[in-house]
Amino acid sequence: MARFTSALLKLRASNLWEIATALEAGVKEESNYRRIRRFLSDYEVGFAELGRLLMRLLPQKPPYKAVLDRTEWHFGETPVNVLMVGIAHKGIAFPISWTVLPSGGSSSAEDHRRALQRFFEVVDPEDIEPEDIEPEDIEVVLGDREFISAGWLRWLQTKEIPFAVRLRSDRKIGLSPEGPSLPARMFARPLPLHTEKVLDGTRHLFGTDGEHVEVQVVMRRIAAPSSREDQFLVLATWGVAPNKATALYEQHWEVETMFAALKSRGYRLEQTHLTEPDRIQRLIGLLALAFAWTYLVGQRRANREGPPRRKSHGRLQRSLFRYGLDRLRKILASPEPMPAAFFDCLRGLRSPTVFLSCT
């Protein structure tokens, strides 16, 4: 794992043949490649224990904002489909638990339930039971328009887990299970641009299979009527103050920043030629650990040297993840050994709180 992480950081590549070239000096590339393949196919990884290590490295205390999202890419015609649960943290989500789905396309309500149960096994391992989830450590669950089935939302309610999920504008809502229903966009059309409205009371959200769930509905116009994009942000919420729902939901995009770090802007996960779910599951575990370490190094660098420069529009030129990645790559890829700097960074994995201290 240490050699793999070192090669991953130096090369910024998840392609196993590329990593094999830098895994261990003096060993043939073919041997290194077979060694990596054996690890990813046979090594018994305790994903709950790995998740708890990632939680320990997260520089944040509960309650957490849990973010669900899915990413998919193809190797040839074979889809690789990953469902991820992360914790929103200062502009980027920390990967905590994940499931590699056996086929492409959208995930099901049962997939969502399993993913969140795995997440709770990590967050609160002593109190968790498969049918008795304790939600005290979770402030809210955030999800996009894929996580909106009535059965799934009702399951969250039975577990007393607050949520804010985005609905499609054509999703039908009504005042009662038996009464008439209208698409959500019909209620949002009168809104001026960038204004928000909370529908009075609770509304019934109807599913395609006849199921329904009672929620509060918050809507905001985010684009002009002439825009070709979706004009409305419509949220189904429960257990969340409606006037805070849209601000909370904005943090859902932090999981997209995390996916970018694991993929094109960081470790290029989508360039791996692996397609077997078990092997992808282990590979993501290695990348998640490297991600957490990289972020900690970036946060420490910002604390000591100041944050990255800001562009003219006010955003940082580099994320804290990239700030740390550049530092580690410089240390690991330098022709001259830098043992003091390297072992200083390793302290982040041992004592994250002390490592991030400026004293």
Image: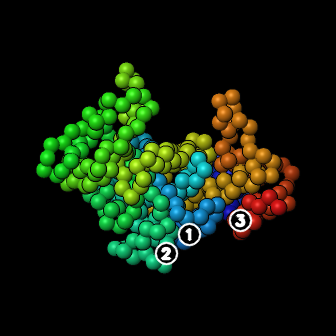
Amino acid type, callout 1: Arg
Q: Secondary structure at mark 1?
A: helix
Q: Residue at x 81, y 48 (%)?
A: 305
Instruction: Report which residue position mark 1 lands on.
Output: 52
Q: Nearer the viewer, residue 255 or 44?
A: 255
On the rendered image, what quadrant is the N terminus found in?
bottom right
Compute the Cα span from label 1 to label 3.
Answer: 16 Å
Query: Which of the numbered marks, if any, corresponds to residue 135?
Result: none
- Residue drawn at x 55%, y 45% as measured from the top left: 257
Residue 169 image offset from top left, x and y in percent: 31, 37
Where 112 sits versus 195, above or below? Answer: below
Residue corresponding to mark 3? 353
The residue at 77%/61% (across/down) is: 357
> Which amino acid, mark 2?
Pro
Q: Residue furthest front?
A: 200
Q: Do the residues bearing badges 1 and 2 touch, measured as CB atoms within 8 Å? A: yes
In the image, 260 versus 202, the foreground residue is: 202
Quarter of the figure that contains the C terminus: bottom right
Dot 3 lies on which element? helix
Compare marks 1 and 2 and give the one earlier in the sequence.
Answer: 1
Q: Measured from the top left, where is residue 328 in percent x and y?
A: 74, 52
Residue position for label 2 = 125
All told, the count of numbered labels is 3
Left or right placement of residue 1 versus residue 231 in this view: right
